[in-house]
Image (tube, grey):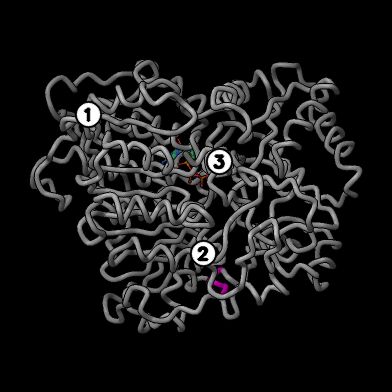
Amino acid sequence: MAAYGGGPWSTVPARSRRAEPIAPSPRGGSRGGGDDRVPGVGELAEAVDGLEIGGDGERRLDKYDMPVDVSGKGAPGPADGFEAAGLAEAVLRNVARCGYESPTPVQRYAMPIVMAGRDLMACAQTGSGKTAAFCLPVVSGLVAPAGGGNGHGPRDRGSFDRVAAKPRALVLAPTRELAAQINEEAKKFSFQTGLRVVVAYGGTPMFSQLRDLEKGVDLLVATPGRLVDLVERSRISLEAIKYLVMDEADRMLNMGFEPQIRKIVDMMNMPKKSVRQTMLFSATFPPEIQRLATDFLHNYIFVTVGRVGSSTDLIDQKIEFVNGGEKRGFLLDILQKQSVGLSKNKQPLTLVFVETKREADSLQYCLQSNGFSATSIHGDRTQQERERALKSFKSGATPILVATDVASRGLDVPNVAHVINYDLPKSIDDYVHRIGRTGRAGKAGKATALFTESNHHLAKDLLELMTGAKQDVPEWLGDYASRPCSGGSSYGGRGRRGGGGFGGRDYRLSSDYGYGGNGGVYSSSGSSYSGGGGGYSSRGGGYSGRGGGYASRGGGYSGGASRGGGYSGGRGDYYRGGSRGGGGSDGSYRQSAPPLPYPSYPRAAADISASGWD
Ligand SMILES: Nc1ncnc2c1ncn2[C@@H]1O[C@H](COP(=O)(O)OP(=O)(O)OP(=O)(O)O)[C@@H](O)[C@H]1O
């Protein structure tokens, strides 16, 4: 396979970019009155609270250049640049303001697909620019004039019709912090377009969000819980939705969250899938979630950059074997060593992941008692506390953030130098997302995992992941990986990743699915686009999962009183049976039962709320 032939990426250090004047739009001209003036970054920052552009250090954006596979009938080819993608001029100006010189691979492929009005499932590595990959074409589609080529007919401004706001685009995100971040990004990209971007998430008073909604909304970013609440109060109507995006889609459709997503999509008056345009994005997409996702997609295109669920080799991954009781000392040692010789305000930003909320509190206290400046974020802290902690971490005022999985997905904190998995997660996909908080946007990062005996179930997947990312793997990990594990392989077992090797990532290509051959599949990594043919019938092919389902993973999880049972193997929908009682919020389990193979996500309503799902 030939290497992916993407356009040259910017490797200009962000700092120098920040200092440079922003170039006027290459096309000149403007849309709508009064847009000729091109503001500088500072001005944009003033206009958009929370704007952050770049950070320190060299960027190796070329690191994301890797084989790209595209499957699905009639997929448009990639765009060489932002202009070639056909984005509206106002949006192009905002791209320039953000200092983006050329699109990342996922952006090159996703933008033309979305601009062509096609549904999309896209999988690309953490930190590789997926947010802009959906925001730019969606914003562009919203500002496009009648007949502007986006296939959505005349422009109809989001309106406030008596009581209900009617957004035309909806972006769903699994946590409040991520929703807030996407909101900021979307605002940047829609600067001076006349579009209104509004965010709605739980944990904050509703009245300010209502006031915002009353002014009208074109693009709404929301967490599912708060959205359901607003729709049920008739403050939002989804009847005008043209674009539906699910960020971190595999998480959104996973575990206890899926029913709420179904409620939003199927039972709240949203146009049906053949009418709206639906886009799903994540760095990880297990086949069973891909299968579930087809319920929401219409004749979609699947794009994967690199291997589904792989980590970027921008991250230097280390794994250390530690006895459970020695973890704290080990962590203190790491932190001590990395801070030597650095002044207080130059400490590297370090994110420490733990499994439970209680452990987060306790570790924060321990670190503080040992002279480290640390804060924490988890589902038991108030939203105000969470936001304060994140802000303090971002600014470097508190360079150590102890977090549960509530911070594992999507958060883009520039300059996180080190991610430490103090407790390893239950699944390899969670690991991929956690370490992906560093090594973003082409910058290098470091990840250290403390592996204990109880993490045996993860050994095989870690070995495979690290080997794939060209990391040094200790011999003992290979030993663990080759030994049978009583708990079976983790849920995130590589066997579920689509058969291994490039080309097997779109689950529709599984022979079980009845995709009908190689129709509409091409790979930028060499083989040519083979056009139509084939075709597939959504859900119709009898996809049988990973051959054996959960039960194949060494005994699987058999339920247990506190969990409400229901984990019976089969095709991945264990949560459908039985109650989902038990479990702490945001991936926090306090019980002393043996570790679950999966999930680390909340499964009861109260947990969902505390995790920020609302
Ligand atoms: N074309 C580009 N040129 C330069 N920087 C970019 C470009 N596109 C995105 N970025 C920057 O890359 C960083 C990561 O982007 P983003 O948060 O969208 O990643 P992601 O793929 O969604 O990651 P995750 O899977 O963790 O959610 C952001 O700081 C963003 O501003």
Q: Where is residue 567 in the image (x, y as percent from the top left)?
A: 62, 67
Say which residue appears at 71% left-offset and 59% top-offset. Answer: 596
Q: Do the residues labelled 3 and 1 touch (CB within 8 Å)?
A: no
Q: Where residue 423 sits in the image (x, y, percent)?
A: 76, 46
Determine the secondary structure under disc 1.
loop
Label 2: which secondary element: helix
Earlier sequence position, callout 2 versus callout 1: 1
Q: Is the magenta stretch mostly helix, strand or loop?
A: loop
Q: Position of residue 242 (x, y in %)?
A: 22, 48
Crowding at label 1, few (<14), some or many (≥20) Cα neighbours within 10 Å?
many
Q: What residue type is labelled 1?
A: Gly
Question: In the rendered image, which residue does mark 3 sit on?
Answer: 440
Q: Kindly identify the residue that appears in the image at 23 percent across and 34 percent down.
A: 165
Left or right of 107 in this view: 448: right
Whether residue 404 is visible, yes or no, is yes
Q: Is residue 168 left or right of residue 249?
A: left
**Is there a contact, CB below 8 Å, between mark 2 and mark 1?**
no
Q: Name the residue under label 2.
A: 576
Mark 1 Cβ and ligand 1 under 8 Å apart = no
The residues colored magenta run 497-501
Read off the residue under disc 1: 216
Q: For numbered disc 3, what is the local secondary structure?
A: loop
Is residue 459 or residue 166 the one in the foreground?
166
